[in-house]
Image: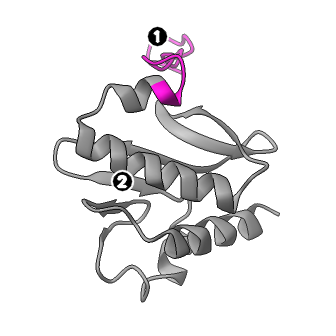
Amino acid sequence: MTRAGTKRVSKPPRWANIDDYLASLPATQRATLQKLRKAISLAAPDAEEGFSYGLPAFRIDGRPLVCFAATAKHCSLYPMSPAVIREHARDLKKYETSKGTIRFAAPLPATLVKKLVKARIAELQ
């Protein structure tokens, strides 16, 4: 609710789909996120693509699994879970992380993405 007591309406994403989002990025980031998207899809073949919090996302049973995005300086994977990041801190030591974000310039290894996505799926079940 806002101060005036009205509900906030979230803005729809600026893109019709994830392909449109990726097409809007510079080539290097687009390639990095396309590899990430493929790795996520392979780790979670039943997940649906869409947007969550304005970010490209994968959902399972309507619940956010992971999101990803590009910024001016890096790409990010959002596992939607501080616990998953803490659990895999050793695997993530080469990357900048925060409570809910993994930042990277080069593509994340597919094996690492699979491990993170599988951990997140287990957490949702």
Q: Which amino acid type corresponds to the residue marked 1 in the rendered image?
A: Ala
Q: Residues within 10 Å of mark 2 (few under 14, many from 20)?
A: many
Tell me the kind of residue under disc 2.
Ser
Above or below residue 3? Residue 59 is: below
Report the disc number at residue 76.
2
When asked about the image quadrant of residue 105, the answer is bottom left
Residue under the image location 72 percent in, 68 percent down: 123
Q: Is residue 5 left or right of residue 21?
A: right
Q: Position of residue 82 (x, y in %)?
A: 51, 67
- Distance between the Cα atoms at labels 2 and 1? 35 Å
Q: Is residue 104 above or below residue 55?
A: below
Q: Residue 13 magenta-drawn?
A: yes
- Labelled pair 2, 1 in contact (Cβ < 8 Å): no
Mark 2, mark 1: which one is toward the viewer?
A: 2
Q: Position of residue 15 (x, y in %)?
A: 46, 18
Residue at 82% in and 44% down: 61
Residue in the image at 37% along x and 27% along y: 23
The stretch in magenta equals 1-19
Q: How many marks?
A: 2
Front residue (pair 122, 104):
104
Near-viewer residue (110 or 11): 110
Q: Which residue is mark 1?
A: 4
Q: Callout 1: 10 Å neighbours few (<14), some, many (20+)?
A: few
Residue 14 versus residue 61 in the image, above or below: above
Looking at the picture, the colour scheme in use is: one colour
Q: Secondary structure at mark 2?
A: strand
User: Of helix, strand and loop, which one carries label 1?
Assistant: loop
Q: Would you say residue 50 sits in the magenta stretch? A: no
Main SS of residues in magenta: loop
Identity of the residue drawn at 48% across and 73% down: 85
